[in-house]
Amino acid sequence: MSAQTSPAEKGLNPGLTCQESYACSGTDEAIFECDECCSLQCLRCEEELHRQERLRNHERIRLKPGHVPYCDLCKGLNGHSPGVRQRAIVRCQTCKINLCLECQKRTHSGGNKRRHPVTVYNVSNLQESLEAEAMDEESKRQKMTEKVVSFLLVDENEEIQVTNEEDFIRKLDCKPDQHLKVVSIFGNTGDGKSHTLNHTFFYGREVFKTSPTQESCTVGVWAAYDPVHKVAVIDTEGLLGATVNLSQRTRLLLKVLAISDLVIYRTHADRLHNDLFKFLGDASEAYLKHFTKELKATTARCGLDVPLSTLGPAVIIFHETVHTQLLGSDHPSEVPEKLIQDRFRKLGRFPEAFSSIHYKGTRTYNPPTDFSGLRRALEQLLENNTTRSPRHPGVIFKALKALSDRFSGEIPDDQMAHSSFFPDEYFTCSSLCLSCGVGCKNSMNHGKEGVPHEAQSRCRYSHQYDNRVYTCKACYERGEEVSVVPKTSASTDSPWMGLAKYAWSGYVIECPNCGVVYRSRQYWFGNQDPVDTVVRTEIVHVWPGTDGFLKDNNNAAQRLLDGMNFMAQSVSELSLGPTKAVTSWLTDQIAPAYWRPNSQILSCNKCATSFKDNDTKHHCRACGEGFCDSCSSKTRPVPERGWGPAPVRVCDNCYETRNVQLDVTEAQGDDEGGTLIARKVGEAVQNTLGAVVTAIDIPLGLVKDAARPAYWVPDHEILHCHNCRKEFSIKLSKHHCRACGQGFCDECSHDRRAVPSRGWDHPVRVCFNCNKKPAWTSLTVVTGKSLLC
């Protein structure tokens, strides 16, 4: 889509600047408008953005002089049709958004926004500009169809005229990975089927042969590819023709009907004759007779809880009259489709095989025939992927080949696989977004090809799934898209220091390139929302079986529990009583730099009394030495060590010399700042729990449930291993995978790796399945026995 911008094109819209700032600073002149990105883009941003796989197929237009952009706010609101965006009339220079008249009134009519400066677009020539755009789009489409040619797909003897998939794709002249649907046409000989296809899809070019003679110009089945609508168009031999083998032609039409997503029945009669209803009724009966087993097998295999009638093709009856009124003209209160259903019932025919039947009529007073109504109806139905979705051309060939072999008698009934006629790829994926309920637009089994779930509409935010994705704003403006997640601590923090900083400064958002870009409580007041400052937000769909997005990654409590488990088990291995040993270990982990380690304190620094295993060691907050309780029972403020104005424990000597200011160097004070914070938090934790050792004495199940992150499955719901299905018992312990949150035995979750998306920056326990995920292959994997459960 991208092309080099000529010097003449620069300066055509000097008031329109790039709205992306992806590869530029937001000051470059806009050259393109992408409706799917909802933004104006400069040349560099357009190229860089649409190199990404998920954005590659976006439709962009090159801006012309006097271009008026779309409104950035309205999405089919304000009484307009859903999905219709209005053109803007002004651009707010403060908010940097384009606004239509309704959105300007709604958002900028009161408060401070009323005073925002705006730039008014010149809309006097907007209608002419839109008409010029439509004409350019129409000419572009015509150019796309200039080289299209049709080819014989199946001859009158039911022989397929293409040798294999590659030959079929080559003759269609489309890409092997192009997804397309199939549109076919039926009708009596001489009613203008080929003419209808040529004018509906190919702008009047004779892609399918037409003839003014009495001879039938279409024998067999012909096919062509429409690159505009991305459909395989199939022309069939007319009914009531001069064929000598009616049963053979009927079988041929039934095969075409089976592979079609949309069927046009073309009639040029002034009134709808009974043969139309009899043909569609008989075709429906034959379709259900031969394909009901295959359709039932497909619905069971694909999990489609829908009636069989919804799996069949849709039908459009295209009725052209000259002297008579169109169906329903004399009954304004009744829709034509209702009258058609009544005709079917009167004739004892029931077209249950078709997902829907539509009527589209046109009255031709003077030639040529108007096919625009038919084209619009076709485009609307082709966009409906509720049950049937586009698929690769190779899938269409395989289905036709299976049908040809089956009805030629080459495969016996007892050896025919029920799924051969209707490959899974013919039908739309049954997955629904858990947040907004919209269905996936891709075909069945797209996951096997590495294609993720996709939807045609945007998702809405759901608090339950927190389906937001954050990307670093600074990286985005440098041309990179880096996802970030809120988490308890930075990757460079140790577990205890990270816990201390979390309690003191809140959660962090860390970018792999920029480091920590946000702390939720960095200041005492006035902390801004990260969306307004450092991250960009995108609301994404939540598909069944996928991981969460910004789900509760604040796993501070579980990180603390992991550390406590590590402490208790390590102490047990040394055959020490855990009560005092755990307290000493915790104290050393978060002690300020000037404190003497507990392991080096063997006796009181004042009375020289030796400490026994159960004796409590106390640190003087002023000098950092170890004392017994009797020699350090006094308290006083020690602000020079960073303890603030509150009284804290000091030894007798430091209490007596309280008027003597300690000589604490600036460098030492800076070095102690972080550890003092950790110590304060550690003491707060101890006071809250009563003591760390008290937490260990609490039943482990209660502690784990309290510390469990939101995405973990509760212990009481885990009865067996999620992988090997072994039942848990006293001898078989439960372990949570830090990635998916399911419960596993040790054998199925012995791997270790970092899980940054869940806030675990250090190697932690993951299950066997999560460890195999391809998206994680770039992460460091640590295998082996660990003490963290």
Image (cartoon, rainbow, N blue to C red):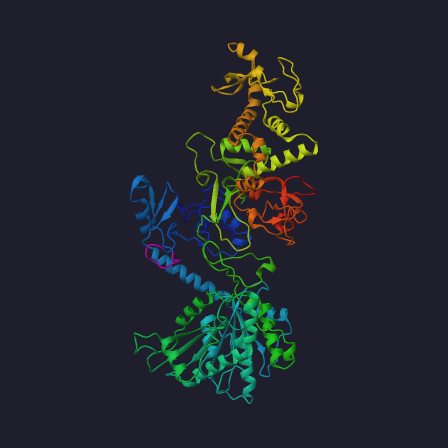
Residue 355's place in the image compared with 585, above or below, is below
618 or 2: which is nearer to us? 618
- Horizontally, residue 272 falls left or right of residue 749, namely left
Residue 202 seen in the figure: no
Residue shown at the point (62%, 46%) measured from the top left? 734
Q: Does the magenta stretch include residue 80?
A: yes
Q: Position of residue 302 (x, y in %)?
A: 56, 65
Residue shown at the point (51%, 43%) measured from the top left? 552
Q: Position of residue 83 (x, y in %)?
A: 40, 58
Q: Is the magenta stretch mostly helix, strand or loop?
A: loop
Q: Position of residue 123 (x, y in %)?
A: 33, 52
Q: In which quarter of the image is residue 401?
A: bottom right
Q: Quadrant of residue 482?
A: top right
- Horizontally, residue 619 falls left or right of residue 102, namely right
Q: Quadrant of residue 423?
A: bottom right
Residue 345 seen in the figure: yes
Q: Is residue 660 magenta?
A: no
How many marks the image carries: the answer is: 0
Residue shown at the point (62%, 82%) measured from the top left? 408
- Quadrant where the C terminus lies? top right
In magenta, the rendered stretch is: 77-84
201 or 550: which is nearer to us? 550
Residue 516's place in the image compared with 278, above or below, is above
Residue shown at the point (65%, 80%) measured from the top left? 410
317 or 429: which is nearer to us? 429
Residue 397's place in the image compared with 32, above or below, is below
Residue 640's place in the image compared with 125, above or below, is above
Q: Position of residue 398 (x, y in %)?
A: 61, 71
